[in-house]
Amino acid sequence: MKIALLGYGKMGKTIEAIALKRGHSIVLKVDKDNFDPFPLEELKKADVAIEFSTPKTVVGNILHCFVAGVPIVVGTTAWNDQMEFVAEKCKEKNGTIFTASNFSLGVNLFFRLNNQLAKLMNPYSDYDVSMEEIHHVHKLDSPSGTGITLADGILANLDRKKTWKDYPNELPADVPHEELPIVSKRIGEVPGTHSVIYNSDVDKITITHEAYSREGFALGAVIAAEWLFGKKGIFGMNDLLG
């Protein structure tokens, strides 16, 4: 498969290494030095694009792929407010897009575990729930897309929580009962650690996912690109995992 990399930072380079090992070729690399604008004819040489750029550039890259007729796998987060617009453009252009807040298999299993645990905890109001995430200092969005997906899963299954709120670095002493707090820490080069904590007066239940490197995310993105080849429409990890 011929792949265009839209975003060639640390994640883009990791994706490149994995794609080459799996027998694919890279026909276009787009970073800040050749971004504005990157050539449509070069993009059209690709069978699929993998997008890990920035929240400011992601939607433009997606639309560029729709015009070129190139399926796109999107790993950039913090653009959910434009998803409805992108979905309309995808339908209008008969495009193909695969989006996920996290491409790691382990994280997506963690999402399902989180949803199930929230359902189990719903009747037990003595337990209050909070979240903590730790990412590297280069992470632009807070909370992360993974954190938002976890929070949305809790809100969908735990009646006593109505909204989530981001708190950088530490949990405040007084959090409204109906609010799900997310403590977002940015430390060193941590790839990503997410914890969901249910705390009562007598005990605590915690589930945690800890990424050891970027390779799990990158491998998932390449597998998504392989799976997406030849398809039309809007897809996500639930489609891939079944």
Image (cartoon, helix red, strand yellow):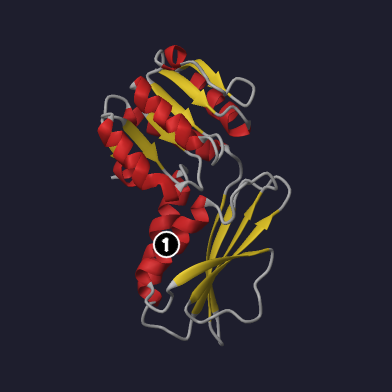
Residue drawn at the location 36% of the way across and 40% of the way down:
86
Query: Looking at the picture, how far across and down is residue 228, in whole percent?
Result: 33, 30
How many discs mark residues in the rendered view? 1
Query: Looking at the picture, how far across and down is residue 82, in whole percent?
Result: 42, 46
Residue drawn at the location 58% of the way across and 33% of the way down:
11
Residue 98 figure quarter:
top left
In terms of depth relative to the viewer, which is nearer, 55 or 182? 55
Residue 110 figure quarter:
bottom left
In terms of depth relative to the viewer, which is nearer, 62 or 17? 62
Residue under label 1, please give it.
Answer: 152
Query: Looking at the picture, how far across and down is residue 5, in whole percent?
Result: 51, 24
In terms of depth relative to the viewer, which is nearer, 193 or 59? 59
With respect to residue 89, does 159 lie above or below?
below
Can you see residue 8? yes
Location of the N terminus (image quadrant): top left
Residue 132 figure quarter:
bottom right
